[in-house]
Amino acid sequence: MVLVFGDHHLDIERRELRCSGELINLEPKAFDLLAFLVRHRHRVVSKDDLLREVWGGRIVSDAALTTRINAVRRALGDSGSAQRLIRTFTGRGIRFVGETAEISDQATPMGSDLASQALAVADKPSIAVLPFENCPAIPNRNTLPTA
């Protein structure tokens, strides 16, 4: 599954985050955190939700959690003050608030230019021309083999 928001492409299966086609280095827990937030963008996610789903129920300090959230924000070009994509709801949790679209893996580009082309072409009828290949003659099914 590839989720697109702004210039970012989040490929969950390949565990890649790209911005304008460039791969963004994100440590594994920060990637898991981002993927969880984007998948659950329809709701505010609590600290308990994050600990259970991202950290597998292990106890993690508030500082470690804050460090990962800040790493995700930096990777997205967001900040704690702007909160353009990840918004904090004091006392409740955090939520991914960016406009998100899902595209298929086949349309996943290596550059954002290809992404817009893939999405634009998907709406229009298309035709593919494949080369013809000569096949050996197929025997007539109505004739019995000679013995």
Image (cartoon, rainbow, N blue to C red):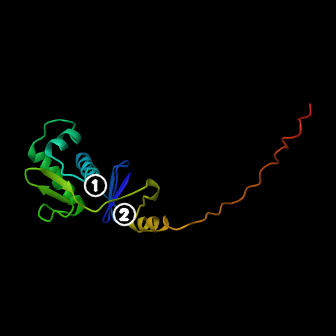
Residue 10: percent from left, percent from top: 33, 55
Identify the disc placed on residue 47. Answer: none
Q: Most extreme residue toward the right, as rendered?
A: 147
User: Which residue is label 2 attached to?
Assistant: 21
Quadrant in the picture for residue 18: bottom left
Residue 23: percent from left, percent from top: 33, 58
- Amino acid under label 2? Gly
Residue positioned 55% across, 66% down in the render? 125
Residue 93: percent from left, percent from top: 13, 50
For the image, the number of numbered tags is: 2
Does 60 appear above or below 82?
A: above
Viewer-proximal residue among 69 and 89? 89
Dot 2: within a 10 Å radius of its alpha carbon, few (fewer than 14), some, or many (20 or more) residues? Answer: some
Q: On the rendered structure, is 27 left or right of 135?
A: left
Quadrant position of the C terminus in the picture: top right
Residue positioned 9% across, 45% down in the render? 62
Q: Secondary structure at mark 1?
A: loop
Separation of marks 2 and 1 at Cα, in angstroms? 13 Å
Q: On the rendered structure, is 132 left or right of 140?
A: left
Of tags 2 and 1, which is closer to the observer? 2
- Amino acid under label 1? Asn
Residue 107: percent from left, percent from top: 45, 59
Residue positioned 77% across, 54% down in the render? 134
Residue positioned 9% across, 47% down in the render? 63
Dot 1: within a 10 Å radius of its alpha carbon, few (fewer than 14), some, or many (20 or more) residues? Answer: few
User: Which residue is label 1 attached to?
Assistant: 25
Does 45 appear above or below 115?
A: above
Quadrant in the picture for residue 76: bottom left
